Amino acid sequence: MVQYDFSGQVAFVTGAAHGQGRSHAQHYAKHGADVVVTDIGHNVETVPYDLGTGDELDETASIVEDEGQEALAIEMDVRDGSQVEAAVEEAIDEFGRIDILANNAGIESMAHAVEMDEMTWDEMIDTNLKGVWLAAKHVGKHFIDRGDGGKIVSTASTAGAVGIPSNAHYVSAKHGVVGLTKTLALELAEYDVNVNCIGPTGVDTPMISGMTEAYGDEVLEDIGAMTGPWNVFGDGGMIEARDISEAYLWLSSDAARYVTGIYLPVDAGFLAK
Ligand SMILES: NC(=O)c1ccc[n+]([C@@H]2O[C@H](COP(=O)([O-])OP(=O)(O)OC[C@H]3O[C@@H](n4cnc5c(N)ncnc54)[C@H](O)[C@@H]3O)[C@@H](O)[C@H]2O)c1
């Protein structure tokens, strides 16, 4: 494992109750950061699987503490600017600063674009795109006020680079994250803030198991027939949350100080096909 030193730094992770967000929180703590773990803590109408719970969020906080770092758990919906602003303020009250924003929260659902209802579209864009902007807006303001830089890393997806059937809303949101990342990188460069995003291929998390349960293997296989395997190695299966956490660590570190505005695929060759 590559060693980083985030001691004295504070990471603010969205969608940290389980899945990749929990892994990112643990990885930041393992490398010396205190971590603010945030999550919506309840289900939403258009998503057919369980989102994170308040209890799971508390478990993530315990995992951070078990790594010897301080944790603060806040239930917060990334779609709501006032909740995001209040959570950022609470984090700064508690720790005095935020150094890293890990913009990870996200949802999935499936429907053909011509059959999709507006609520499904809106909930997706509000969560997976507007939510990323809102967290970057409020943490970005703090970075500017404080005046000594910062890091914003967001999770896009391979869906930020290609079309995926039955995912027009998700693909549009994730392409939006790539554009938002480039623009924020230019706007925040003068404040020494690096802004980057990551494009994971299929990652083994509650999102994927929930989607498989809700829509069935056949639907996902139909999509796979059009997009090709998620992974060109081995059996073509999913990668793990820790593979994405490692990219978060690098992009949050000084080792990547001249990396900004990029979309970094961690895709096991998905986009090379
Ligand atoms: N799992 C994959 O295959 C995969 C692939 C590419 C990209 N991604 C992206 O990775 C990120 C993490 O996904 P995951 O696989 O860990 O999913 P997950 O469902 O396991 O975890 C996502 C977390 O985000 C939280 N969340 C959802 N809506 C929220 C909101 N409005 N406010 C705050 N928190 C909210 C959920 O409660 C949950 O804890 C997402 O942005 C997802 O789109 C996932």
Image: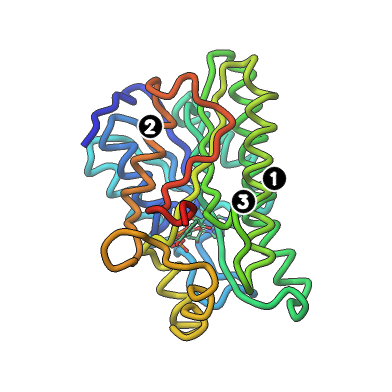
Amino acid at pointer 2: Trp
Q: Which residue: 34% across, 58% down? A: 239
Residue linked to disc 3: 78
Task: Give the quarter of the figure containing the N terminus.
Answer: top left
Circle 2 crowding by C-alpha within 10 Å: few under 14, some 14–19, many from 20: some
Q: Is residue 89 left or right of residue 27?
A: right
Instruction: Judge by depth and name the residue closer to the eye, 44 or 119.
Output: 119
Question: Which of label 3 and label 1 is nearer to you?
Answer: 3
Instruction: Judge by depth and name the residue closer to the eye, 23 or 80.
Output: 23
Q: CA distance from mark 3 to mark 1?
A: 9 Å
Secondary structure under badge 2?
helix
Q: Which residue: 38% across, 32% down? A: 250
Amino acid at pointer 3: Val
- The numbered dot on residue 250 is 2
Residue 252 vs 104, above or below: the answer is above
Residue 44 vs 186, above or below: the answer is below
Question: Is the shortest distance between ligand 1 and the CB of mark 1 under 8 Å?
Answer: no
Q: Earlier in the sequence, mark 2 or mark 1?
A: 1
Q: Position of residue 16 (x, y in %)?
A: 43, 52
Q: Mark 3 and 1 residues: CB-CB less than 8 Å, in contact?
A: no
Residue 9 vs 206, above or below: the answer is above
Q: Mark 2 and 1 residues: CB-CB less than 8 Å, in contact?
A: no
Amino acid at pointer 1: Ser
Q: Position of residue 225 (x, y in %)?
A: 50, 76
Circle 3 crowding by C-alpha within 10 Å: few under 14, some 14–19, many from 20: many
Residue found at the far front of this picture: 273
Secondary structure under badge 1?
helix
- The numbered dot on residue 82 is 1
